[in-house]
Amino acid sequence: MIELLNVPSLLTVQDSGRRGYRKLGVPVSGFMDDYSARIANYLVGNPGDAPLLEFLLAGPTIRFNASCVFAVAGDVEVKLNGAPIEPWMSHWAKRGDVLEVGTLESGLYGYIAFAGGIKCEPLLGNCSTYPRAGLGRPLKAGDNLNLGYVVLTGKDGRYLPPELRPDYSSKEKTVCVVLGPNIDHFTEEGIETFLSESYTVTSESDRMGYRLDGKAIEHSERGADIVTEPLLPGTVQVPASGKPIVMMRDAQTTGGYAKIAVVAAADLPIVAQSRPGERLRFRAISVDEARELLIRREKTLMATKDFLDGKMRAYRIMAGGEELIAFTKVERRG
């Protein structure tokens, strides 16, 4: 139903990730920025975990071979048949229409969702691409993809206003972390360095992990190596070099470097959307605070979905000198 005419950068099919196989050494994979990806799906009326296209920095050119409703999530220029259209909005495409997605102005990953999702043959029960293990492959020009069947009526014209969009434009981002579990492998000075310095994302970063550069983090006499143990996306390992590595969605399931912290799940998209050359700072919070951040984020996502479905109204409020977005239910009369 869609044909890829031009693929200038990494383009893969992703969904919410592969669950239940880490014990066999299979990474979770899935959306690098699950916040943006889920909103892209909500824009076209899909469940948040529906398979879609994830592109790295530069988007593809696509020809539609059947009518379709689509949406592009990202700070990017989008054209349909050469005419500019809005990102963060669902649009109707007819057979023969051509979609061109440009280069992201900010952030690193963008998403293209289609009503009905992308049809794929599940591998280990999932559609996420993990090329290292042969679970799918990066897409290329000439590839054709089928979409799931869905009634398209009322799916187009959904629009996410700028104040509800994630903003990844800052060149220095602060990320919340929970310290540990191998905190005894670091000196007090090393921990202080980690929490007070800024670290630059290097070009040696990919879906597996982001290598950071900055002031070396000092290990204690216990050293940088540990007996290999499980790790998760968001884990911050520190090898003997003292330069941290943040494990991402395609991270291996075990590791032998001491772990100084784990990025709060709600903030992992912030790391994912940081480009090489941009900087990260880390702020320590408790497990309870990390859980509260995630709960708050999930509530915001659900309210955003209801807003796009016409069930909620969004408006600005001032709280503690900060401008926030509040949601209220739309009253149905008659």
Image: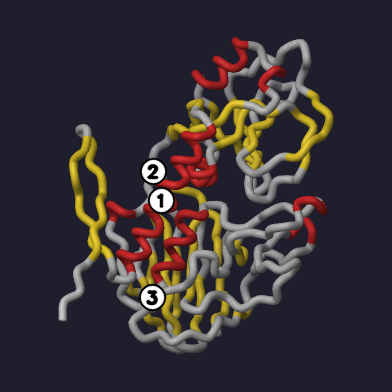
Position of 167 with respect to 245 (left or right) is: left
Q: Quadrant of the N terminus?
A: bottom right
Q: Which comes before the other along the chain, label 2 or label 3?
A: 3
Three-letter residue code for mark 1: Glu
Q: Which residue is mark 2?
A: 169
Q: Which residue is mark 1?
A: 105
In the rendered structure, find residue 80 and report the number of the disc placed on it.
Answer: 3
Position of 284 with respect to 156 (left or right) is: right
For the rendered model, the colour scheme is secondary structure
In the depicted structure, whether residue 90 falls above or below residue 273:
below
The residue that appears at 26% across and 49% down in the rendered structure is 325
Q: Secondary structure at mark 3?
A: strand
Residue 84 visible to an observer of this rendering: no
Q: Which comes before the other along the chain, label 1 or label 3?
A: 3
Is there a contact, CB below 8 Å, between mark 1 and mark 3? no
Answer with the quarter of the image where residue 307 lies: bottom left
Is there a contact, CB below 8 Å, between mark 1 and mark 2? yes
Q: Which comes before the other along the chain, label 1 or label 2?
A: 1
